[in-house]
Image: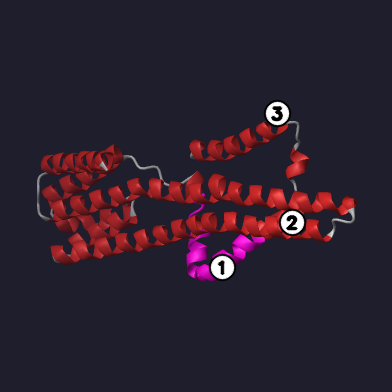
Amino acid sequence: MDFTSLVGVFFGIVCILIGQALEGGNVGQLLQITAAFIVFGGTGGAVLLSFSVEELKNALLLLKDVFFGEKVDFEELIAEIIKFATKARREGAISLEKEARNASDTLMVMGLEAVADGTDPALVRQMMETQIAVLEEKVGGAAKVWESAGGFSPTIGIIGAVLGLIQVMQNLSDPSKLGAGIAVAFVATVYGVGAANLIFIPFSTKLKTKYKKVFLKKEVIVEGILSIQAGESPALIERKLMSYILDSHMREETL
């Protein structure tokens, strides 16, 4: 579990509630069913209108990766690639056919099977890069859904505020109804801005951040598989992959 994600969500919300309490308020003042319907219902409708069913499904399925996700261990990954490289060096590439199904990553499985079958290196690279591109599109689409929800919700919150003020203006002669309208107006704005900045946009950002390592892992696998196919020594492959990872980290820090 990614504790930074879990703690981040609760820490932000709890701090806001504590601030509300310090100002003399209470949690009950922020519980407004009408405002919630307007903001979350309106945001949901806008998202549904903006994206396809497949994109929405991917966004929900990948949401678990914000809190869990794949833990990438590059040392373990390189050790696994070196194990396959050593076997191929000793027994030939065809020996990888049976071993491939035990690989830890589906991309590695596909690459090793292709190498064992004697597939042209250019085609092996193309097949693997195509699989990576499909995953990148899937993750990018999911992140865009949550990012868009974060863009819609503050505006919908403003709509809720305006609706609440309309209610207030229509009932100026009846003071007993003014409180409900004012509550909807202000709480809807809180819901809209809060949901965007504490939930939706952070979800999008966390997905992008976590999958940076996953995509680097995929790139390492591609380089490792092609190096095995080229017949390079395990020691050379290890040095190459380690330098590839270090170079990628340096480029990220520079950016």
Q: Where is residue 59 in the image (x, y as percent from the top left)?
A: 50, 59
Q: Quadrant of residue 17?
A: top right
Q: Position of residue 95 (x, y in %)?
A: 19, 55
Tell me the element at label 2: helix
Q: 10 Å neighbourhood of mark 2: few (<14), some, or many (≥20)?
A: many
Q: Residue at x 18, y 67 (%)?
A: 123
Q: Residue furthest top?
A: 22
Q: Position of residue 244 (x, y in %)?
A: 19, 43
Q: Which residue is drawn at 72% across and 54% down?
A: 35
Q: Do the residues labelled 1 and 3 touch (CB within 8 Å)?
A: no
The region drawn magenta spans 41-64
Q: Earlier in the sequence, mark 2 or mark 3?
A: 3
Q: Is residue 26 above or below residue 183?
A: above
Can you identify the residue that label 1 sits on? 48
The answer to whether residue 119 is visible is no
Circle 1: residue type: Leu
Q: 10 Å neighbourhood of mark 1: few (<14), some, or many (≥20)?
A: some
